[in-house]
Amino acid sequence: MQQSLPEIKSIGAELVGISPQLPDNSLSTAEKLALEFEVLSDVGNKAAKDFGLVFKLSDTMQEIYRGFGIDLEASNGDQSFELPIPATYVIAPNNIIKYAFIDADYTNRLNPETILAEVQKL
């Protein structure tokens, strides 16, 4: 998405990421990845819950995450072990969702070309 940011901006759109991480951790991630778009912090997955996009990691998955050195408790600031399902929304200037892509398989992401095509329809 970062690579497509100039095209997104050139058609008058904005790109925003939302993360369940605490604000300092979201900022660190954005800095580490040199992101030039805003990354908002959805502490407690409140917005994700409103969209019905939250799931809880099983005990087995929690152990796998720990084995990879991923400390969700520290990163997200709670012990819920809840994560959002990845989703992409194209929202019109009147705040109506015009396009949505949601896939429980986090490896399947909407490609930037599709996002740009949907934004250009607005």
Image: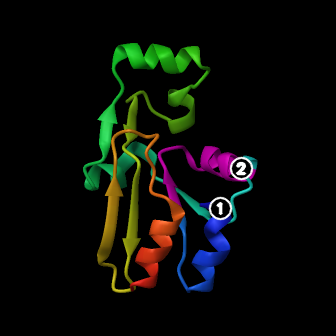
Q: Residue 44 lies in what quarter of the image?
A: top left
Q: Amino acid at mark 2?
A: Leu
Residue at image x 47%, y 13%?
63
Q: Are marks 1 and 2 in contact (CB under 8 Å)?
A: yes
Task: Provide the major secondary structure of the magenta segment.
Answer: helix
**Percent position of residue 87, x then y:** 38, 54
State the quadrant of the C terminus. bottom left
**Percent position of residue 18, x then y:** 49, 55
Residue at image x 62%, y 20%?
69
Q: Magenta part of the protein: which range?
A: 17-31
Q: Amino acid at mark 1?
A: Gln
Q: Residue 95 lies in what quarter of the image?
A: bottom left
Camera-side residue: 106 or 72?
Answer: 106
Select label 1 or label 2 by which is in front: 1
Q: Residues within 10 Å of mark 2 (few under 14, many from 20)?
A: few
Q: Which mark is residue 2?
A: 1
The residue to which callout 2 is attached is 33
Camera-side residue: 74 or 92?
Answer: 92
Question: Circle 2 sits in a helix, a strand or a loop, which is it?
Answer: loop
